[in-house]
Amino acid sequence: MLHDPTFWVAVAFVGFLGVLVYFKVPPLIAKQLDARADKIHAELEEAKKLREDAQSLFADYQRRQHDALQTAEDIVARAKEDAEILRKESIKELEATLMRRQELAEIKIRQAEEKAIAEVQGIAVDVAIAAATKLMQDGLKKDKADALIDQSIKSLETQLN
């Protein structure tokens, strides 16, 4: 049995185990393994927490993006409404301006007509006075006087044009 290598391997193995137990190596190994397991567990918990934070941030980003898009749509809709209101107001102002200009033009036309009528009446009065003066000075007979009045009226038409 002392010459059997299996025996010596068994003795060495038992001695090795005895040295390990004597120096309290298994509890040290178990302690290190437990510490490593705790560290891995803590890292897993931290990774889980980071993942939840990332999902929360992603959901917040999506919500903000949706809110920003909604705000942009609201701004565009409000801008379109404002543009339509401004267009309508511009049309009303343009129509009012055109109406004022038309009224001013009509007033100027009326004034020009009144001035022309006054001038025609003045010329007619002047011609009538001249004809009457000439008739009185010449003492014309009724036939010649009528002819002279007709001639004055014809000359009046040419003077007015």
Image (spheres, rainbow, N blue to C red):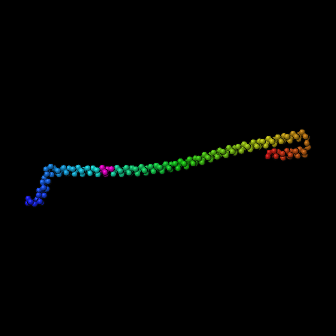
Dominant secondary structure (helix, strand or loop) of the stretch shown in magenta: helix
Residue 112 in the figure: left or right of residue 45: right
Q: Position of residue 39 (x, y in %)?
A: 26, 50
Residue bounds of the magenta highlight: 45-50
59 to the left or right of 80: left
Q: Residue furthest front?
A: 3
| Lateral position of residue 94 relative to residue 76, left or right | right
Quadrant position of residue 110: top right
Taking the magenta stretch, the answer to whether it contains residue 38 is no
Residue at the spot x=67%, y=46% of the render?
Answer: 102
User: Which percent across, then down, holds residue 32?
Assistant: 21, 50
- The quarter of the image holding the N terminus is bottom left
| Residue 49 counted in the magenta span | yes
Point 13% across, 56% down: residue: 13
Whether residue 16 is situated above or below residue 111 in the rendered picture: below
Q: Position of residue 121 (x, y in %)?
A: 79, 42
Seen at 85% across and 40% down, the residue is 130
Residue 9 drawn at (x, y percent): 13, 58
Residue at position x 18%, y 49% in the image: 28
Q: Residue furthest left?
A: 1
* Quarter assignment of residue 113: top right
How many numbered marks appear? Answer: 0
Between 103 and 161, the residue placed more toward the observer is: 161
Q: Nearer the viewer, residue 143 or 158?
A: 158
